[in-house]
Structure formats: structure tokens, C-alpha cells
Amino acid sequence: MSLSVSWNLELLLDKATSIVFAADRGVGKSHVIKRIRKRLQSEGQTLFIYASADKYGDLNFVNCSFQQSVAASLEQQGSEEVSQWQEIAALIVVDALKSSNSEAKIPSTTDLAARFDKAYQKSRMKGRDLVADLTKAIRKVRPSVDPYIIRAIIWTLSEERGPLAVKWLAGEQLDAQDAIDLRLPSNQQGEQEREAHALLVVSKILSIIGEYRTVCICFDELDTISSHDLGYPTALVIADLVRKLFTSLKQSEAGKGIVILTVLLPDIWSFFLDQDAEVSAKDKIASAGAIDLRNVNADSMTELVSLWLSPFYAARNLVPLTPIYPFDQEELTQYSKNGLYVREAIKWCANYVNKKVESFTPTDKEKTPTEKLNFAYDNALEQFSDDYLDDNDAIAATLSFCFQKIIDSKYISDAPIENVVLKSIEEVTPRSRNSGYINFKLVGIEDGEAVTIGIEVLQQTNGLSVGAGFRRLLDRETFGLSRGCLVRSRERKLKRNWDSYEYYQQLLDQGGEWVDLTEDNIKPLLALQYVYEHHEKFGLSVRRLDSFAFVQKLLTQNALIGEILSKPEGNLVEEALEGEELQPLHSEEERQEIAANISESLEIPCSEESDEQPDLADLEAA
């Protein structure tokens, strides 16, 4: 992959900058985006927001979907072992402390998050509202900021109330009691009204956090198929969103800046370039120019192989004959002369090395079929890195593969597994309502009756994504489910103060379940899929693999498959939960007073109208 860059250097000095990645499918744009995110996370000076259009089921509400992306991305861990929301909240608190007392003792971000609830409770005992005091202090420094947004961001430091604050920042509706406790509007609006205001709210959020950290926003997966009432394709809808967002962002001279990165297919980018200059959006979606991600050619192929092999030789203290050994330069040049996708190039390299290895080992003809299977399976178990449990799509694809194998097998298809005989795997529709959360549906016969099980692999750790996934599983009527099955590691616990805690209880009440995803129960299935996909490499046929009793036993007696198909017991798993249940922070009299303030127009909260100086000492003392 190579980069061709065309920059407008003057525009790079602006506080808001937009760039386009023009790349064909398979060139490696997703890999580049991941590297960008890891680099920014390691440096710790930039917040990364990922907006994947394939999660935007209904493009008529694209502003609301983007607001959800912003909130969910900032809930991911940043560079300081806390969420990105908490990093910004800590900077805001520091700003407030310094504005009140230039010599104030400043706690670290992690200490601040750990102490916040204790400090808040201490301030309540004094008849004060720490969050209101902080909001008042910061508005003296930055009078134009929205007090409710500032208040919500500060609340993200709270272990108890943080998830509710993120929910509010995502534009979701709060229960009346939660709105009272946080002293925030409850967002009780219809979909159309929310959509009309969402972009303005997002612009305010980004403008605020851009004062403290550089913000990088990445719009990806714009080639997805989705729906819009006016018939516009996804790429044009997102491009219009980028244009509006770019225009609405506001930054002060001291602001850290905002970068918007949009990934487009080359023909879509050419469409914008061909438009009349007076009406084109290209100056808004690529104010700093475009970067072309190109296919691998002869030069970059050699560079790729050399880069790939270098750490291998260094780790073993070896000096190769050439930087690309055991590859031949002429073969690399010949293979790559027509242009390759990066995935194609890497796959070819892997096959090349395997053939070289095989030339130094006994041939497969010397092995029995069982020996070939054992060798293939043991080899497959070593293919998976430590982070494979984070990949929802890969795990879901493996489960789908294995269930399909059971259905298609002439040896085990009619045999019930946990009293279920599988008949088919179905796609989840309507896609616009699902937004990719439920991966597939299992259709079968359970104890003589038809059953449809919705399978959802959900390994995310942020509350918004987990809550959204639960809501899909609970909507059985829309998706035609008999019950929902959440596949998730119990180590990725649910906080009792998340909405998801209640959703989990509702899932159990509906006859659904949470199935524990562990390395021990998924790795054998990943290995089996690998063996099937690379059967020729191991000298095995698909038909021969199907006939092995080992394969049949692995499919029918795997603990994960059995737990998914078994009838749920309906018991809440306490070890999958953490924290205490949410309790009201205010007395009935206080709630009535706060509710009266919320019912007024969106002005500054009443406690911030006071002329008293804010008392922030509790943060230092906590």
C-alpha cells in the first residue's frame, strides 16, 4: 500500500480540517485506521471518534446515529486507563480548579475518577452541588459553553452516574428520576425533533472537547447498502453530514483542533471532484486534500515483505541472505506487477512460506488421514492471537459456520443437540432496525415445537453499545425471535447502574439467556473453521473432514454450542455483574425543587445563578 498525498498547507493551520482517504475495497484502509487510532492513543494528545456507517440502519436519522457514535467512541478507554470522556472531564475540572485557585492541588485523572463520587457526597452533606460548582467555575473561563453539556461531561467521572451521563450525551432519553438526579433535561423528544437538534448538540460537544484535546473523527464503511427516503446512497448522506459538521464547528484561538477523516471509494471521490465548484461539497469534506491508498506494486511488495520478515529474524538473532529471504525478488516483481490488494499479497506470502516449509518436511503422503487431521488441528490452534475475543464479527462468523456444518452434515444433522434439531440459519431483518447487532437466527425444532433463537456476540465494554445490543434481543416481535441469546464473556461485566442491567433481567424474563464466551469453548471452533478453510494445505478434503468422528464430536459436544441451544434456566449470573444498584441522590423535597428547575426553559441551572464562589475544596480533600 502506498500513499499519494495532496495537501493544502494553509488549511492545515485551521482549527477544523477535513481529509479524504480514497481507497478501493481491500486496499488496507481499515488497517490504516487501526494504526492511526493506536498511534493517537499511545501519544495521549488526541481523542479518536470512529463513525461506521454500516451501523447507521436508517439514514433518515443520520445525525442521531452520529451522536451515538461520538458518545460510544468517547466511552472507549483512552491513554490514561480511563475513558476518553473522563479524560476530557478531568481537564475541565482542572480548568475549573485553577480558575478558582491557581495554587490548587491537582489530582491525576485516575485519582479524580476514583474520588469523584466521594467528593460529590461530601459536598452534598454541606448543602452544595459539586457538579454545579464546577460548571459555574468553568463558565467563568468559557462563558459560551453549554452548561448542560459541561455538566454531563463532568458527571462521566462518576462511577455511579457516569453511564447515565453518557446516555444523555448520546441523545437518549433519561428516566424522570435520573434527569432529576443529574439535573439535566430528560431528552423527551420525538425522533424527528431529536434528529433536528442532534447535529447542533454534537457540534457543541466537539467544540468543547476540542478546546482541551485534538479530536480525530473517522467516517468509514460508506460503501454499505442502507436506506434513505429520498434515495440517496450512504456515501452522499455521510458526505453531506461531514459538510454540515465542518461548517458548524467552532474553536477558539487556544483550541487544539479537529480533524475529520472520510474514507471513500475512488469513484465516489471522483464524483465530488467533477461537481461544479460553487455547489460541490469537496471543499468541506477535503479541505486539506486527499490521500490515495493504492494497491501493492513491485516496489511496495518488496518493502512489505522486508518489513514483515525483519522482526522475525531480529527476534531469533539471525542474519538472512537477503532482507526478503526466502522470497525471490524476481518472483515478487512478477506476482505484484498487476497490482494487488494488501490482503491478497499477505495471503500469497503465507502460501509461499508454507510451500517452502513443506519442502523441508515429510510429504503428506507419508501421513494417515487421522495424522493429517491432528496436525492440521494442532496447527490451527496456534493461529489465534490474544485479542481474537474482541472481534465480534469473527466469533459470530465462526459460530455461524459451525451451526451450518451441523445442519449440512449427513452424519449429525438429524441428531438433537440439547433437544434442538437445527433446520436453518437465517439473516436478521429488517436490517435497518438491527444495525448489525443480532448476527443471525437459528431456526429449529425444540421438543417438537418450532424455535427461532437470535444469536448476538457482544464483547464491547462501553455501556451504549451493550445497551443497544440488549434492546435488539428484547425486540422479539420485530425480528421474529422465540428467544434471544447473548454471547459474551462474563469477565466483561455489566455494571448494575447501567441500563443493561435491567435489560439483562428483561432478557431472562423473556426466556432468553447470557451464554459465557471463553477461550476454552470458542478456540476449538475457530480452529475447526481454519482447518476447513485451509483443507487443501493439509491434504484433506471437505468430505473427508465431515466424516471424522472427531469433527462430529467437536461440533455436537462443544460447551458453547450446547449452551446456546439448551433451554435457558432463567437465572441471573451474579459473577457477571459489578457495582451497586443505582440509588437516588436527593430527598423528595430536593427532587421537587430540582424538577421545577428542569421544567423551565433551557437556561443555566438554578445553583449557577448564585453569586457565591464555588466551593471546590472537596475534590482536593476527597
Image (cartoon, rainbow, N blue to C red):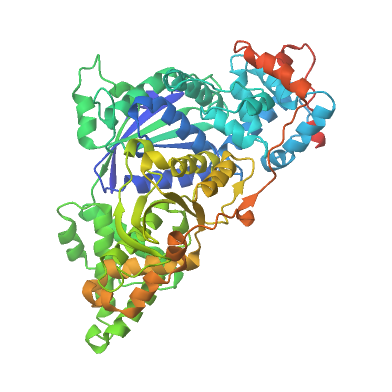
**Image quadrant in which the C terminus is located:** top right
Question: On the rendered structure, is 569 left or right of 259?
Answer: right
Q: In this orientation, which residue lies closer to the viewer: 482 or 455?
A: 482
Question: On the rendered structure, is 254 left or right of 24?
Answer: right
Quadrant in which residue 361 is drawn: bottom left
Question: On the rendered structure, is 515 left or right of 159?
Answer: left
Q: Give coordinates of residue 81: x percent, y percent.
A: 61, 46
Asked whether residue 32 is in view, the answer is yes
Q: Give coordinates of residue 573: x percent, y percent.
A: 60, 55
Q: In this orientation, which residue lies closer to the viewer: 252 or 574?
A: 574
Residue occupying the point 63% across, 14% down:
599
Q: Give coordinates of residue 564: x percent, y percent.
A: 44, 59
How many numbered circles are shown? Answer: 0
Asked whether residue 140 is in view, the answer is no
Residue occupying the point 52% across, 38% down:
464
Residue occupying the point 60% across, 53% down:
572
Question: On the rendered structure, is 207 left or right of 605?
Answer: left
Quadrant in which residue 582 is drawn: top right
Q: Is 440 above or below relative to 158?
A: below
Quadrant in which residue 13 is drawn: top left
